[in-house]
Image (tube, rainbow, N blue to C red):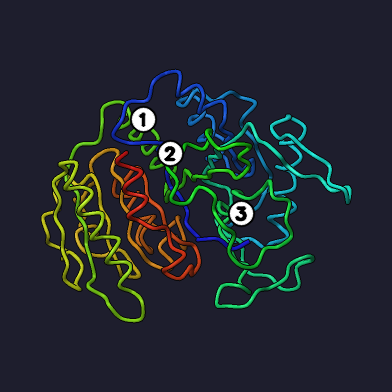
Amino acid sequence: MLKPQYLFIAIVVCLLITIAEAAEQSLAAATVVLYNKAAPDSVQLARFYAHQRGIAHDHLVGFTCSTEEEISREEYDTTIANPLREIFKTRHWWTLHETPDQEESVTASSIHFVAVIKGIPLKIRPTADYPGDVPRPGPMGNRNEASVDSELTVLAFMSHQISGPTPNPYFQNFRAIGDFENATMLLVCRLDAPAAATVRRMIVDAIAAEKSGLWGRAYVDGAHNTSGGMEVGDQWLSEITGQLHKVGIPVVYDETPALFPEGYPMTDCALYYGWYAATVAGPFTQPDFRFLPGAVAVHIHSFSANTLRDPNANWVGPLVAKGAAASLGNVYEPYLQLTSHLDIFNDRLLH
């Protein structure tokens, strides 16, 4: 089921605030951690993350699945989705209702958050003639490739409709997921990076930033692109700049078509938003560049998270390898309108 193919490489529920112990316990109780038994690093990282976040052992769920980043729809169904649905049922994380045609329907869920650990496949390649799927008109209507993470968000829907977008009830909403009545859509993030040591560092840095705050500068790199509807990307970045100014965060905003150059002194970088290049470039290619601990960094591109295993390919992998604690990106082409709206993302990050 194709949705905006964003992939959260984040373990940050909320930066710039201190999370009370009671809130941490509530979040931990509503979280499951998914790992791959066939990948030793995945097992160790899952245990480390659960320990750091106070997540109960019975909320760790292991699969024996492919260690490749890209898998088939059949592999996703048989080794990840179907086994996970059975676990949600047997552990009574779902409230189930039988429909008149004797099919199961999920009416409520005690689990709201899913942490996907490095080692779980990243994306699902397109397929044809999937039983129950009806391709729809439009450029996205007949597309069914997806990130594993986005498919997990709709695990409770029990749907065979995998082509086309699915409405997100949380979009542009200020309510916490726990405030939604009978919320069943999951919020999924991924703890992944080119190296296992980087994932551990992301976990530690994010928790530290939650407790003490994230202090530093923001760098926003616009593209001044007005062709073919692309201006919306610059609108997001311009809005972000205004949001940051309002709360007193120092911002460097570049509106020229070129990216920040390699030699640009991007010091004390706590936030980075930019576009539009296919591969990491500019200051991030310098050997001595590092983000501040806990930093959030995002670059808009159709395939910014096409792989997370190469510290020099695309954007998400290189950004976290250079010290960012959180990023997001696309594993397949989402088109700009279905890309994560960074102005909304930044607004929620600040509040």
Dot 1: element: helix
Q: Amino acid at mark 2?
A: Ile
Judging by the rendered image, the residue that carries numbered circle 3 is 151
Judging by the rendered image, the residue that carries numbered circle 1 is 207
Alpha carbon distance from label 3 to label 1: 27 Å
| Residue in view at x 72 percent, y 54 percent | 77
In terms of sequence position, does the residue under pointer 3 or pointer 1 come before the other? 3
> Percent from the top left, x then y, of residue 204?
36, 32
Alpha carbon distance from label 3 to label 2: 19 Å
The crowding category of the residue bearing disc 1, from other C-alpha atoms within 10 Å (few below 14, some 14 to 19, many at least 20), is many
The image's mark for residue 11 is 2
Q: Quadrant of the N terminus?
A: bottom right
Which of the 4 image quarters holds residue 232? bottom left
Extreme residue in the bottom direction: 228
Q: In screen coordinates, is 327 left or right of 160?
A: left
Of marks 3 and 1, the one in the foreground: 3
Which of the 4 image quarters holds residue 32? top right
Residue 75 versus residue 43 in the image, above or below: below
274, 105: nearer the viewer? 105
Do tag 2 and tag 1 residues touch (Cβ < 8 Å)? Answer: yes
Q: Quadrant of the C terminus?
A: top left
Dot 2: element: loop
Q: Amino acid at mark 1?
A: Ile
Q: Is residue 295 visible?
A: yes
Alpha carbon distance from label 2 to label 1: 8 Å
The crowding category of the residue bearing disc 3, from other C-alpha atoms within 10 Å (few below 14, some 14 to 19, many at least 20), is many
| Residue in view at x 19 percent, y 59 percent | 283
Q: Amino acid at mark 3?
A: Glu
